Image (spheres, rainbow, N blue to C red):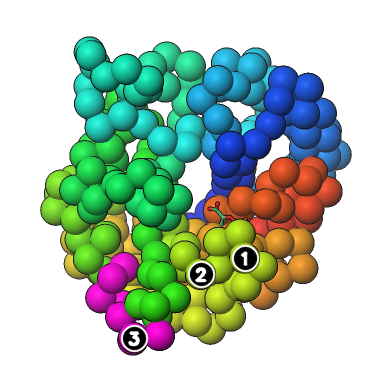
């Protein structure tokens, strides 16, 4: 049986500077040279730093990621970045549907699905984020909310859904220090995997990452769950020792 390789992706959000990025990535790539990872690793960085980070990551096993992409192909969309531009800069992964984009930029399920299509068409793997708010969890709606968010992307992509990476990120756990328990996360991951399996022949093999205050102390327990294939890491991805510990906890 083929196993799903673990995957740790950092999301820097709107953090960094030329100097800070260089220091952080020097420490991370050096750490990974000393202790080669058993998992795939990527960092999703702010758009202005893509070229810098592409250069800093040359020759390392860490892949370049973006945090967003335009839903449009090209043209008069001031301020937007197209999937083709990301591909030009060597971007391999692109976040879509992060809860901060859904919440602060009004991104709907349909927009998220279009963005995922744009990335795939440019040869970039979308990391599709889904997750419920605290109010939705307390109302017992977790399963329906994440299923709806995933279904919108599955409908748009058809069989290509098996080419995505999925991230379950409960909104109430992002940046709050409040993590889903391994059991809570596992339950949602298992349901998402079943949904993926019924959407495409290779759907069960789609990596399903957990995100939401994953850190050096709690990563191993979360990653030990049978349907948690890795992590999408915000705050802890900005500290090299913490990010390296999380990578170390992700065995194949
Ligand atoms: C995220 O930004 O996707 C995230 C999970 O953030 P944090 O790890 O800081 O909760």
Magenta region includes residue 145:
yes
Quadrant location, the N terminus = bottom left
Q: Nearer the viewer, residue 103 or 22?
A: 103
Q: Is mark 1 within 8 Å of ligand 1?
A: yes
Q: Nearer the viewer, residue 203 or 21?
A: 21
Local SS, label 3: loop
Q: Name the mark on residue 251.
A: none
Q: Is residue 60 left or right of residue 197?
A: right
Q: Taken as a whole, is the magenta stretch helix, strand or loop?
A: helix
Splitting the image into 4 quarters, where does residue 121 fall? top left
Vertical placement of 117 versus 197: above or below? above
Judging by the rendered image, the residue that carries numbered circle 1 is 176
Question: What percent of the width, then of the height, locates residue 92?
Answer: 46, 31
Magenta range: 138-146
Judging by the rendered image, the residue that carries numbered circle 2 is 172
Vertical placement of 10 versus 103: above or below? above
Question: What percent of the width, then of the height, locates residue 46?
Answer: 55, 30
Q: Are marks 2 and 1 in contact (CB under 8 Å)?
A: yes
Vertical placement of 47 versus 173: above or below? above
Q: Is residue 126 visible in the rendered structure shown here?
A: yes
Ligand 1, image quadrant it occupies: bottom right
Local SS, label 1: loop
Local SS, label 2: helix
Disc 2/disc 3 C-alpha distance (Å): 14 Å
Disc 3/disc 1 C-alpha distance (Å): 20 Å
Q: Earlier in the sequence, mark 2 or mark 3?
A: 3
Total marks in image: 3
Judging by the rendered image, the residue that carries numbered circle 3 is 139
Q: Is residue 232 left or right of residue 27?
A: left
């Amino acid at each position: 049986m083929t196993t799903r390789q673990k995957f740790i992706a950092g999301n820097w959000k709107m953090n960094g500077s030329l100097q800070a990025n260089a220091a952080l990535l020097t420490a991370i790539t050096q750490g990974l040279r000393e202790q080669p990872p058993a998992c795939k690793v990527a960092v999703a960085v702010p758009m202005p730093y893509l070229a810098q980070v592409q250069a800093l990551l040359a020759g390392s096993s860490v892949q370049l990621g973006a945090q967003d992409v335009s839903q449009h192909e090209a043209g008069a969309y001031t301020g937007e970045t197209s999937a083709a531009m990301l591909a030009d800069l060597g971007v391999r992964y692109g976040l879509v549907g992060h809860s901060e984009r859904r919440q602060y930029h009004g991104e709907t399920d349909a927009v998220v699905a279009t963005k995922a299509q744009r990335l795939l068409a440019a040869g970039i793997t979308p990391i599709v984020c889904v997750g419920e708010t605290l109010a939705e969890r307390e109302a017992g709606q977790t399963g329906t909310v994440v299923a709806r968010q995933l279904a919108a992307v599955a409908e748009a992509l058809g069989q290509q859904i098996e080419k995505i990476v999925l991230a379950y990120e409960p909104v109430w756990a992002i940046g709050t220090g409040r993590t889903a328990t391994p059991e809570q996360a596992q339950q949602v991951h298992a349901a998402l995997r079943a949904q993926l399996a019924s959407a495409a022949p290779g759907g069960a093999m789609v990596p399903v990452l957990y995100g939401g205050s994953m850190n050096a102390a709690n990563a191993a327990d979360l990653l030990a769950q049978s349907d948690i294939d890795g992590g999408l890491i915000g705050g802890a991805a900005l500290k090299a020792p913490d990010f390296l510990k999380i990578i170390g906890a992700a065995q194949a």
